[in-house]
Amino acid sequence: MCSFAAPGLWGAMNSLGAGGAQEPYLVNTGNAVTFCLMIVSCWTTSSIIKYIGIKGALVVGTIGFAPYSAGLYLNNRYGVEWLVVLGAAFCGISAGIFWGSEAAIAIAYPEPHNRGRMVAYWLTWTRVGQILGGAINLGLNSDRSGAGKVSYKVYLIFIALQACGPFVALLLNRPNKVQRSDGKPVELTIDDNPWQEIKATTKTFLTPKFLLLVLWIGQGVYSESIFFTYIALWFSVRARALGSFLSGIVAVVAGNLLGLWLDQNQIDLKKRARWAFSVIMTLQGAWWLWLTINVTEYRRTQPIFDWSDPGFGRGFGVFIFLVSGFQLNYNFAFFIIGQISESPKDTIRLSALLRGTESAWQAVSYGLNAIPIFALVGGPYINFGLWFVSIYPAWLVVRHFGASSKGTELETTSQSEVVNVIKS
């Protein structure tokens, strides 16, 4: 539910394109600030958890999302710009802590054989926020067939829901009260000195198995600013609202199907991993080719598509598929982390590095897409290239999955899973 109230509704606004604004450049600048600060706040999450616990960190992590929405509201209604950037800064500080906390909870709370589905379920709540937000947007903007910004009333609803986030976080069970079906307790604690943890995480980052994944992580998350900017530039207000709603539904279905496939333990792990990787990367390549053709043409013709216009399906469909691809990459990334880790501590360090690397790539992506030429065509071209150069390095990692485990995931044999959290 916290994923719904905090990043879910953040995603709902951004899935409108440009946070619902008429032009994407200011909002992209704000989002770049958010992700830059998230890189920093992620590295301090372990220290915060050490002193206030995982539940306290989750509460703190939800606080900064409402100020972000407030900045978008004031900009939409009154043209105020400064709070867009300041609200984005508050969001970045808070969201880094939230990402670290929720990732630790999602990985540590469920049993190992249920993690694929549980990760998909967790990420589903993020998309549920987008679906609900999209439905609200569609209801309030269904008569707006031209270009422009969404109704300011949308933001009031989002601010109210996001303000509930800290209270929802208080409902989380503490780790020592979690009852797992395998009978193993979950303990989310920080025992080591925070500086020692940071050094250990840095050492993990420099291992070949993670460095080979950096480009692959980038091609997956760089796309977020690309497709949100794309729909803001070339579609009517109500078409953007429809995209927010439908893309969330399709992404939920795709993510849960992938989670179901990855948890089919009766199928050889090698086969599951290779098929998932091959299908995801093939689809991504097709979608990037499609988008590249579209934006090259749109830069010349400068259309604004409404759902009743010729050519709408061709332009709109690729947006839906790219949002789904983002979800598939996200889900598969956590599967990869589970496979390359060698201990519970290693799992969380790798998860932290994953989220931090994602934030760095997204900071670059949103920053570049604040520049008009990158927003129009440069961003899709870069992401298409990233997709191509990332395939082989990532394959060098994925091809080893199942080679020595005979198709079964590594099960933690200790009676307690002690998870040391560093956010990314």
Image: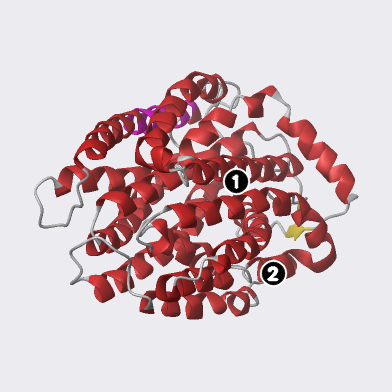
The residue identified by callout 2 is: 60
Q: How would you classify the magenta stretch by its main secondary structure?
A: helix
Q: CA distance from mark 1 to mark 2?
A: 19 Å
Q: Give the image location of residue 182, x and y in percent.
A: 63, 55
Asked if residue 416 lies in the magenta stretch, the reply is: no
Q: Earlier in the sequence, mark 1 or mark 2?
A: 2
180 left or right of 176 in image: left
| Number of the label disc, if any, that sits on residue 410 | none
Depth check, front residue: 401 or 374: 374
Depth check, front residue: 230 or 147: 147
165 left or right of 261 in image: right
> Residue at 78% of width from left, 54% of height from top?
46
Picture quadrant where residue 158 is located? bottom left
- In this picture, which residue range is highlighted in magenta? 270-284
224 left or right of 33 in image: left
Q: Give the image location of residue 27, x and y in percent.
A: 48, 57
Spot the residue most to the right.
193
Q: Give the image location of residue 231, x and y in percent.
A: 31, 51
Structural crowding at the residue carrying mark 2, measured as other residues with C-alpha within 10 Å and reported as few (<14), some (14–19) or many (≥20): many
Count of numbered circles on the image: 2
Asked if residue 273 lies in the magenta stretch, the reply is: yes
Q: Is any part of residue 244 visible from this angle?
A: yes
Please state which amino acid type lies under the numbered disc 1.
Ser
Circle 2 SS class? helix
Q: Is any part of residue 415 visible from this angle?
A: no
The residue identified by callout 1 is: 359
- Marks 1,2: beta carbons within 8 A: no
> Residue at 58% of width from left, 61% of height from top?
85
Which label lies toward us, 1 or 2?
A: 1
Please state which amino acid type lies under the numbered disc 2.
Val
